[in-house]
Image (tube, coloured by chain):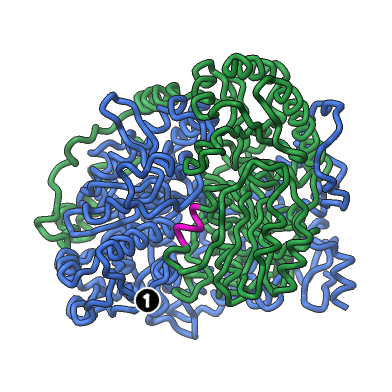
Amino acid sequence: MRYLPLTPDDRQSMLATIGAQSVDDLFVDVPEEARLNGPIHGLPMHAGEMAVEAHMKALAKKNHAAGDMPFFLGAGAYRHHVPASVDHIIQRGEFLTAYTPYQPEIAQGTLQTLFEFQTQVARLFGVDVANASMYDGSTACWEAITMARRITKRGKAILSSGLHPHYVSVAKTMARFTKDNLSYQAPTLDAATDGQNMLDQIDDETSCVVVQYPDILGRIGDLSAIAEKAHQHKALLIAVVTEPVALGAIKSPGEMDADIVVGEGQSIGVGLQFGGPYVGLFGCKQKYVRQMPGRLCGETVDAEGKRGFVLTLSTREQHIRREKATSNICTNSGLCALAFSAHMTLLGEKGLRELAMLNHKKAVQAADRLSQLDGVKLLNDSFFNEFTLVLDADSRPLVRKLADQRILAGVSLGRLYPEVTPLAHGLLVAVTETSTEEELEQFATALEGALS
Amino acid sequence: MSMLSEGRPTRQEENLQMTDDGSITTHTGNRALMVDEPLIFEIGSSDRSGVDLPEAPQVESRLGGLEREAPIAIPGLSEGEMVRHYTRLSRQNYAIDVGLFPLGSCTMKHNPRLNEKMARLKGFADIHPLQPVDTVQGALELIHELAEWLKALTGMPAVAMSPKAGAHGELCGILAIRSALEARGDAREVILVPESAHGTNPATAAFAGYKVEDIPANKDGRVDLEALKARLGPDVAGVMITNPNTCGLFEPDMKKISDAVHAAGALVYCDGANFNAIVGRVRPGDLGVDAMHINLHKTFSTPHGGGGPGSGPVVFSEALAPFAPLPIVEKMDNGHFRLVEEETAEDHHSNSFGRMVAFHGQMGMFTRALAYMLSHGADGLKQVSEDAVLNANYILRSLEGVLDAPFAKSGPCMHEALFSDKGFANDLSTLDLAKGMIDEGYHPMTMYFPLVVHGAMLVEPTETESKAAIDQFIGAFRSVAERAKAGDELLKSAPYFAPRRRLDETQAARKPILVWTEAEDFAEAAE
């Protein structure tokens, strides 16, 4: 077995040192009836690299890779080009095979990159501080709601209808057990966001308002008025960003006075990977830092006065506070945070702004092209790189039909909101720097054919 | 070096001169391959980029009047600078690739590179979670295949694949327990957790809205069965047990514990963090467990990546299976795979407690874990646990003469060996020994955990270390332990040879600096 270095002689000599006859003697605490003799039935025996690779490749081949065909899916996961050097860096064994940096003297590599990551995220979001990552955007969103509850000591959260329905599902699942009161209704096919509705709902019982920016239908709404009204009622504004590249083009939530900003960082540095692992981003105003969940990396000095970094404020965390911790999170998404940070370092502000405008203008082009088709209307007045088309037909079978023609057309709102019949006519279309004009034409032609 | 009032250096490093009280210093402060690296904010600039993009089409933008005008102030680097920055930083990290990483309860084993290659196949890496299911049949099949392995290895009938890490898996299990109890109209309020449990256990129970109570350990480091039985009652929803436990010992009464818990109408959660000790040799399903998470990033070698990503699938008993979270992958009679989501759950998964996460879990970890399992096979996985346990016992017996091993007399350990700081002289501590191990070229063992042992040191070598590597580690550990017992003053300031000396964690927490700010601005603000 190529990963196991002990030889039979090694094992014998080690057993002799231990004073055991056989390895079975080391399992004496396992009751007789729970011991298995021989390998578990029904599973294959060990295999070499070639055999394993063949097996895995056969499975991989049964999937349609996004890069092999016109591809327009988004809804919380976006296909962006990841520069080759990013994957090279995260495969360096010193990053890949390190543990959470509990011994800072020999983990400065991980710690400094986390400090840089936190700074990048805080600046991108326009807030004071950010943590060292969460699992993903959806769990970060729920953590932000619980953080607002701790800060305001109120349990009513108002969720925008523009919040990703999976994020809503995660919050609903948890709220059932924590007894938080969530106010939410599914979106309607309007060009305007539900900002006014949010304003109307805020009262003195409200702990937080949770608004996605741009929202699930791609619409971009100003958050300033919501922040102002929330603050008048001593409630918090939580902004949720599922496409962080957008913040290279549009105002940061922090500039509009959001208190907590969370997001999905997958777009930058992390591939699609069928939904995971991704990287949750979590930032907030300085005054709330001690209520944050997750790991925080902080700057300090060593015994010789040299600058160094450590995990800090761990009295918030489960390994110290146990049941009084701000969250149960332990392992987070360190390597994806490194990928995010390395990609962001390649982009810099200049590259990020260029990438964002490239995405946006390609999307404008696509929206104009597709909305010329009979039976297709563009919902949005404003959008970043994703918009909603309202079709004359149910978009679910249409998406499947186009997939049969090897075109991945977008995400049907019918799949995201199976319980809301009118939404089935909505099709979410995302356009990034990876889509070409030829692919757009193929999509337009196929869509026209499917609708006629 | 010039410092601000709170001791923060204003600059990375001032130029040092050639000698200073006899020691040799350099102009840069660097020492050959040991090179300090500034922050990207100190070397990059907002108008530099390592990415070339095509021109954007000439169309009007439609950003709703919300253009970002203020500076973002994120610096860029050219590709060469970026690669050098991170490569230099990487060299300040200890990692399994660098050496033995005996961090107890963390299972730092070798991460096979085949698995990295497999995770990057475009058919896995470049597929979107919301693609039509007909276009991702291979991905669903892989998830299903991995699920079958996990069920077979644990002897449990169902598994939830979506939890993102161990603690998220714990949450999944506890929510299923709560759902099952609520479904029978018997909402209970208390979860019992042994004192020796991982901190995530009580934190998870509280996160799910439960009260948490401790159950004590007996003098052998096991759960006190009688004390547990005495506490069970109509208010207890469940018990969270780690088996093998955090003292590195198998709970021989596990089945009796499960039976007692079930008799009291409660359910058993098992923390599977230590599954590496028993994989292929013991099935938790035979011990009466109702739910257990499996850390794919421990037992099944998906890389820890400096703190994640992990993956924490949860296996369930028949009692809890109906409450498993969405989404669920199912194999249909025609050989196709379907994905049960909100859209399709009503017909036969109506008891599911709902969704825990957007999308379907950690696909990138599933590919690695399955490649690991296929490589080892049923025979190899059994060998894994045997060698892991053999290595740990070898360390225990090789060192029990020099270090206090609180439970060594009660029999063999499982995959990790536990020592205490008893007998250290001159106020030397576990921390001092750990820092001494750094100078010897090792990542230290887990320190001060479990909490039930004073100055605990938990050593988990894993099965991927050779006898020679372990002998060398034992030699180093013995040497540093003997220094600690002799009261060697030098240990108090160790490490001496790491990229940094001991870091001031108190200062870091008292005045947290969590993001970089311009040195000048900071200097002004501090004055």
Most extreme residue toward the left is A33
Residues B280 and A118: in front is A118
Q: Eyeballing the image, is B197 above or below B348?
A: below
Name the chief secondary structure element in magenta. helix
Look at the image and give the colour of chain B: blue
Chain letter for the green colouring in the rendering: A
Rendered-image quadrant of the N terminus of chain B: bottom right
Image x and y of residue B440, in percent? 51, 61
Image x and y of residue A274, in percent? 50, 36
Image point 72% across, 57% down: which residue? A196
Image point 49% across, 24% down: which residue? A400
Residue A277 seen in render: yes
Residues A342 and B60: in front is B60
* Res. B230 image quadrant: bottom left
In the rendered structure, which amino acid carries the disc numbered 1? Answer: Val
Image point 85% across, 46% down: which residue? B65
Q: Eyeballing the image, is B347 above or below A361?
A: below
Q: A337 left or right of B514?
A: left
* Res. A141 image quadrant: bottom right
Residue B38 seen in render: no
Residues B232 and B346: in front is B346
Chain under disc 1:
B
Q: Is residue A229 magenta?
A: no
Image x and y of residue A145, in percent? 58, 64
Rendered-image quadrant of the C terminus of chain B: bottom right
Image point 29% across, 57% down: which residue? B291
Most extreme residue toward the bottom is B426
Q: Which residues are magenta?
A: A169-174
Q: Eyeballing the image, is A418 above or below B36?
A: above
Q: Secondary structure at mark 1?
A: strand
Q: A411 left or right of A306?
A: left
